[in-house]
């Protein structure tokens, strides 16, 4: 099988070779726990504190406010449940939006079962949350606002700074899930005005199984993992030293390469949008066109279904073809009967959500790879459409022309 | 996730398309659910046998593979024999399907049954005419 | 500095080179997420399922009942808080013992603040919990019993099978923290009769940052990390594929080498006990003499303090001396003003708890290393005692002779 | 965790032991808390100067290092000067101590002060005799 083209970097990225090199000694001979006093332990402690500083530098934070976790899912659960627990006596109302990641929505659903009230703000047809809607939703008993920095599926970047102004004026804790932005676009906790921020190393060329939480000094939050005295008693458990060192190295690399890389990827992204609009009929672009992650592309192809697109791309039949790995919001992949709740939040009819393709690029992806992938996608779309009993070219249900106004296709059956 | 047989039928579907002037047509599914299948059959009236059968399918890998498999199983069978081709038969012929796909994406046999019904309904009409 | 002798393996172990080799490809080229459909993803899924099988085999469990976590701290928090949440309506009483690890005690303390009642059973002077005391403590509103399999500090192995019989008769969920036993002594969830069991890979030659929870089919427990559909929706978060693969490899190795290694270590352990009793005056052996982890040794040296022993051992002054890494229950190291709660639970006076030394051996430690360490410890004890304003040889406060009956020293001041 | 200076004083403690026939003795701490220090001094009565000072300490690395440092700082100083040797002075002379050690293991200057007091008390007695 020829060299695959990996365009699913929002799911996970390949760890930078420098990151792996940095981790190596801590996996093997330098295996001491930072909690111990002897020299092996203090070496490990120095290493994790250097990683802490490096991550803090990447997000403009004080290193004292950084706490390592096992990933963004843990950080998000911690933010939601930890603030809820600490501020329960103040009130039991939380604000978020309908297009959040499951690691935010599911903890909230859990709280709802316990009697909490959650306001799910809508997004507009580009996936943007309106800061004024946040302001309007804040009540006396609101203890937390949690909004994603950028959506993992459609790439839309939220007006975090504007929301942060509102929450800080109203004295409500503001959590931002920055799993998709840290290391990819500039993130500055002070500029954004956030109190809590989640991140996962494997989303920016670091290892899986390690993440971080930024907790602004003074913010009240109950630990999620109680136990030993690690992380100033806020997150117990023997440190994942190799993982943390890897996250530190990834942060350091990102700090230096992020801006150039973001520019390059945004160029590729815009090129893809132009190309698909010019070369594939009846598509709809999902998510905001410019307020968007540089490496994220998402569009729906009318009349076909996402899993079959994905499978066709990743298991090409021609022996010399390169597999192309993308993702989709189709129900067939989500593990439920529903297509992506994020695409539905944009107002997309289910059949277009089923037919969505997400391309998420990273530093290994070249213009040549992208062009190869695009030709392949167009060919796959053509072939699957020829098999489709419902697709008729140019039936205007969802032509590219009106996509940005929101496609008003109705159930096609 | 999928067996080799599923992947084979997905990648190299048999009998894709529509038979000309079909004697029976069965359409099942709903694009909102992500799956639509249309089975068309040509029947040898004398022998009550399916001479040709084709599918068109919008759907996931399993939907396409089961459609392809159902046409292969049905071709050359009498209508009575073809009526025995259940979802289970199709799934087994493919070496199994992932549990979550057993229902949502395994409608092809329903499509075939509908096509047979359609044929019988038309035929009955013809006879009574 | 010469080759150090690492005798702090209860804190963490050095990953087996085979474990690191097994992890390598998943850190680098095979970086796909098991949640994805394309071939990279299904490879990763197969790899974590193989690891799951391998860990299940190690503990005699069905692989369907294994859930990967970030470590024993997470598993323990999950067990305590997850059962409490799921069974709250049945009752709000939990039973444990006073000598548990902090990753059990701190979640319990958290629940106590929320109105839960916790019974902390005492241990005897060897650290053993009495199964009859468990039986007597179970009430109608008891929802969980949590007892450690073996204590990390004094190595005492608890009568889990006997307790498991009681809990299963009474229909109470039984959680066992097996962080120190899995991979070191035989662990069989059915023989032990446990419903939930926690483990951490780095404690048995696997990587840090990954652990597992065994959940017997049918046991009700709320997730701790809500979010995506990973681990059958019971533990969300992108899989730490390299870590999980490493845990699988460590399990496989342990399954084959555990018995021989346990026998070897128990021999060394008994040798150490004999040696220190013969060569250092006024010591007390802590923990059960035979119902004990094979690699665990713990004794108190009267008249001196543990941190200074540890430091002297790990930073030797002679240029050709080998550093020796041990641990202690002294307050100076625990990060609090109190010495180890576990040693106090045995009835030890605080000054003996401050003067405890823990030696925990692993497969890299040879008889030669151990003998070197013992000579060094004796010399360090001698030197520190010469500096001690309180120590008088043979004052019988705590001579070796009566140590196993429990030392009844009183405050020495 | 500890500075090099702390480690140096811990590994090579100065003035360890007890002065013979001390003119003043100060003992502080409690073995239950893990720290006991005993400072003994020899005073030049004419000059009101500490001619010799030694320590014996049960305790952690910081306890031993601060004891050693306090004796070094005190030796040759007049009693008045020596009374200025506070915990803070000792910690600074060692290049700092970890925060959690600032209190529990930094009793050596208290021991010295006690020894000075003890000397003064005895001396006062002698004078009044
Ligand atoms: C927006 C967002 N939040 C949270 C997560 C969870 O991160 P992890 O799976 O590393 O815990 C992800 C990725 O899965 C994500 O894309
Ligand atoms: C008995 C016991 N339980 C739980 C833990 C926690 O394990 P981890 O630090 O890997 O989360 C440890 C080790 O720290 C332990 O020894």
Image: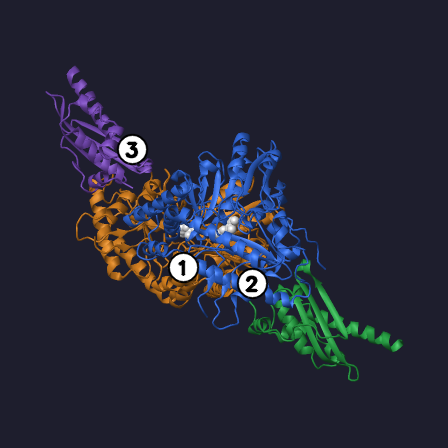
Chain colours: A orange, B purple, C blue, D green
Query: Is D72 or A266 nearer to us in this picture?
Result: D72
User: Please, which chain is the residue tagged with disc 1 on?
Assistant: A
Q: Is residue A67 visible?
A: yes
Do marks 2 and 1 share a subunit?
A: no
- What is the secondary structure assignment of the residue under circle 3? strand
**Distance from the alpha carbon under mark 3 to that under mark 2:** 80 Å
- In the image: residue A64, left or right of residue C250: right
Quick one: quadrant of the N terminus of chain B? top left
Few, some or many C-alpha atoms within 10 Å of disc 1 (few <14, some 14-19, many ≥20)? many
- Single out the residue that lies furthest toward the front: C278
- Single out the residue that lies furthest toward the right: D129
**Distance from the alpha carbon under mark 3 to that under mark 1:** 52 Å
Query: Is C57 or A88 nearer to us in this picture?
Result: C57
Q: Which mark is residue B29?
A: 3
Write down the quadrant of residue B93 in the picture.
Answer: top left
Do marks 3 and 1 share a subunit?
A: no
Please say if B70 is above or below D31.
above
Q: Report the residue marked by disc 2.
A: C378
Q: Report the residue marked by disc 1.
A: A27
User: Please, which chain is the residue tagged with disc 2 on?
Assistant: C
Q: Which mark is residue A68?
A: none
Q: Does ligand 2 reach within 8 Å of label 2's beta carbon? A: no
């Amino acid at each position: 099988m020829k060299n695959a083209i990996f365009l699913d970097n929002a799911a996970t990225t390949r760890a930078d070779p420098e990151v792996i090199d940095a981790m190596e000694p801590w996996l093997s001979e330098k295996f001491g726990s930072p909690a111990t006093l002897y020299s092996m332990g203090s070496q490990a402690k120095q290493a994790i504190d250097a990683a802490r500083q490096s991550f803090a530098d990447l997000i403009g934070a004080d290193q004292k406010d950084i706490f390592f976790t096992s990933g963004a899912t843990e950080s998000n659960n911690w933010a939601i449940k930890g603030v809820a627990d600490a501020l329960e006596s103040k009130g039991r109302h939380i604000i978020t939006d309908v297009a959040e990641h499951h690691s935010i929505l599911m903890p909230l659903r859990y709280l709802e079962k316990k009697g909490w009230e959650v306001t799910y703000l809508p997004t507009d047809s580009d996936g943007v949350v309106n800061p004024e809607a946040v302001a309007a939703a804040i009540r006396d008993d609101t203890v937390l606002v949690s909004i994603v920095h950028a959506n993992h599926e459609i790439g839309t970047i939220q007006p975090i700074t504007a929301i942060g102004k509102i929450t800080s004026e109203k004295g409500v804790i503001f959590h931002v899930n920055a799993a998709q932005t840290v290391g990819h676009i500039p993130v500055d906790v002070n500029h954004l005005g956030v109190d809590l921020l989640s991140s996962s190393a494997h989303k920016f060329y670091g290892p899986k199984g390690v993440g971080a939480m930024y907790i602004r000094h003074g913010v009240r939050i109950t630990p999620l993992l109680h136990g030993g005295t690690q992380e100033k008693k806020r997150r117990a458990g023997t440190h994942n030293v190799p993982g943390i060192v890897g996250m530190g190295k990834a942060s350091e690399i990102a700090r230096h390469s992020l801006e150039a890389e973001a520019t390059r990827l945004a160029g590729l992204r815009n090129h893809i949008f132009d190309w698909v609009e010019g070369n594939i009929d009846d598509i709809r672009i999902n998510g905001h066109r410019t307020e968007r992650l540089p490496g994220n592309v998402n569009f729906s192809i009318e009349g076909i279904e996402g899993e079959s697109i994905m499978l066709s791309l990743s298991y090409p039949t021609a022996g010399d073809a390169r597999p192309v790995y993308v993702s989709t919001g189709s129900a067939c992949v989500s593990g439920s009967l529903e297509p992506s709740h994020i695409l539905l939040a944009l107002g997309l009819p289910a059949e277009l959500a089923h037919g969505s393709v997400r391309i998420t690029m990273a530093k290994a992806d070249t213009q040549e790879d992208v062009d190869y992938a695009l030709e392949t996608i167009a060919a796959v779309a053509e072939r699957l459409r020829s098999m489709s009993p419902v697709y008729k070219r140019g039936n205007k249900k969802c032509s590219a022309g009106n996509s940005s106004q929101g496609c008003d296709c109705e159930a096609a059956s | 996730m999928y067996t080799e047989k599923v992947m084979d039928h997905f990648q190299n579907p048999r009998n894709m398309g529509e038979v000309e002037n079909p004697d029976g047509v069965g359409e099942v599914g709903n694009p909102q659910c992500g799956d639509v299948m249309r089975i068309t059959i040509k029947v040898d009236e004398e022998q009550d046998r399916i001479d040709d059968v084709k599918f068109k399918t919008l759907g996931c890998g399993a939907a396409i593979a089961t459609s392809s498999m159902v046409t292969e199983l049905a071709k050359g069978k009498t209508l009575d024999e073809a009526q025995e081709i259940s979802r289970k038969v199709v799934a087994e012929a493919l070496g199994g399907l992932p549990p979550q796909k057993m229902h949502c994406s395994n409608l092809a046999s329903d499509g075939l049954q509908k096509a047979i019904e359609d044929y019988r309904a038309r035929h009955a009409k013809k006879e009574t005419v």
